[in-house]
Image (cartoon, grey):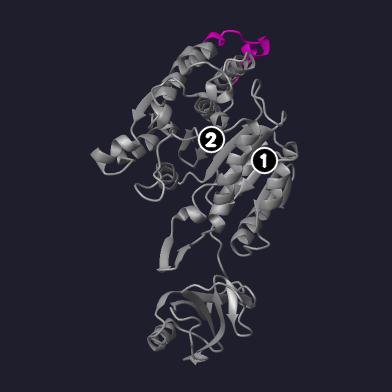
Amino acid sequence: MTKQTVTLIKGDGIGPEISIAVQQIFAAAETPVLWEEAEAGLNCIERYGNGLPQETLDSIVRNGAALKAPTTTPIGGGHKSINVTIRKSLDLFANVRPSKSLPGISTRFDNVDLIIVRENVEDTYGGIEHQQTPDVAQCLRLITRPGSLNAARYAFEMARVAGRRKVTCVHKANIQKMTDGLFLRSFREVAVEYPDIEASDILIDNLCMQLVSRPEQFDVLLLPNLFGDIVSDLCAGLVGGLGVAPGGNIGRNAAVFEAVHGSAPDIAGKGLANPTAFLLSGIQMLSYLGLNSYALRIQYALEKTLKAGIKTRDLGGNSSTQQFTEAVIKNMPHLPQALEASQDVEKPARIIIPVPESHFRNAEWEIVGIDVFTRSDNGLPELPEKIGKFRLTTLSNRGTKVYPGPKPDILMVDCYTSRWIADTAVEHNDIANFLREFPAAYPWTHIEVLYREGDTPMYSKMQGE
C-alpha cells in the first residue's frame, strides 16, 4: 500500500513525548503513514516572531492532513491561539469531537457514545473585539449563513457515513434571535435533505442539564463555535476527561487532528504524560484517510490495555508514558478474527462538503436607521429627539432600555446605545450629516446601520422595546 504523508506538529510541553509514543504505536501497527515534521508553539516565537510559521501551514496544505500535539496559548496577552489561527487560515469549518466510554475508565456513565460537530471559525472566535469606552469592552458575535450551512451539512453527512440516526442542533435562539436564529434556520434548511436521519433541536442550557443526567439519549450534536467549545469539554468529562478526548478539525482541502488538552509544562520530561487522547486523535485521522483497518487495530490494542488496568497516573494508574506505550504495542498482535478479516476492507471516511450557494436577494436592502454607541461620563445623555431625517426612539445601557419611560434602578456604565429611525428614504450621506450634527458632548464610538428587506426589518428590537 502506498504510504500517505502526514504533517506532524509536536508542540510544547508534553507534546514531544506523546508524539513519540504515537509514532512508536503507529510503527508497530505498520500504518502506511510517513511523518513530515513541522514546527508550531513557543519554540517558534523567537525565530519567526509568531507561534505558527508559514512553512507549517504550507506543509498541512501540501499533505492534506496533520496530527498536532498541544501548543501553549497565553492567557490575557501574548501570541494568538495557534489552534484558532490554523482553523481560520485553512477554513477548517467543522470541529469533530467524539465522546465515547472506554473500558477501564471509571466514570458516572458507562454508555456514552456521542459525537459533537462544532462550527469552527465564526462566532465570538472571529476575534473582533473593541474597547468602546473605559468601562465597556465589546465582542462581536458573527454567525453567517454559509458557515452555518457548512457545519450542518457536515454533521448530517458524517452521521450518514457513521451510521448515526439523529442530529440535534443546540442553540439559544429564544434569546439570541438573530444569530442563533440564523444558525437554527440553516440547520433546518439542510435537515430536509436527509429524511433518513432524525433532526431535532434543543436549548443550550437544557442540553447541559440533560447531558449530566441522560447523555445516552444523544447521538450527534451540532453547535455554534462557543457553545461547542464548552459542551465538548463537558462531554469529555462524561467519559473520563480531556486525557481521553480526541478531536479533528475538518475543511474541504485539509484536516488537522489534535489532542484538546493543554501542553502541561509542569510534567514535561517526567514520563507522566498520558498519550491516550493524542492516540485517539491519530485513530480518528486514520479513519479520515480511509485506513480503517489500522485504526481498528490500534483501537483494539488501546482498549485491551486500558481494560487490563494499565493506565497513566491521571487515569488512576501508575504506568509511565513509555510503559503505557509499550503495553499498547504488546497488545497489538492479539486481534479477534473479525478484525483480522477486515484488514483488506478500507472505506474512505473523508467527507467533501460543497461550497454553499450564494443566497441571492430579490430586493435591495433599504436603510431605515442607525444604532449609535456613545460615551457619557455623567449619566443619561441628553440627546435631541430628532437629528436630520432620524428620530430618537430608544436609549439603552448594558442592553436594558433606559429611555423613554421610567429609568430602571440598574447599574449604568459610560456607554449608551441610541437607536435612531428614519421615516423617509435614507442615503449614506444622510448618516454622515447626522454624525456631524451629533452632540459633541457625547462622543460616539461606533455605529451600526439598520436595514430592512421589503417589510422585514433586518435588526432586532432592543431589550425592553
Residue 413 shows in the view: yes
Q: Which residue is label 1 attached to?
A: 220
- Residue identified by numbered label 2: 247
Work out whether 379 lies above or below 11: below
Structural crowding at the residue carrying mark 1, measured as other residues with C-alpha within 10 Å and reported as few (<14), some (14–19) or many (≥20): many
Query: Residue 252: x percent and y percent?
Result: 49, 42
260 relative position to 336: left or right: left
Identity of the residue drawn at 40% across and 68% down: 134
Residue 32 visible within the image: no
Q: Sequence order check: which comes first, mark 2 or mark 1?
A: 1
Three-letter code, disc 1:
Val
Q: Left or right: 99 with respect to 95?
A: right
| Span of residues in magenta | 330-345
The image shows residue 251, relative to residue 426, as above or below, that is above
Give x and y (percent) for residue 90: 42, 44
* Residue 275 horizontal side relative to residue 9, left or right: right
Q: Residue at x 54, y 14 (%)?
A: 328
Say what amino acid the circle numbered 2 marks.
Gly
Name above or below for residue 347 compared with residue 224: above
Q: Is residue 426 magenta?
A: no
Residue ranking furthest to the left: 47
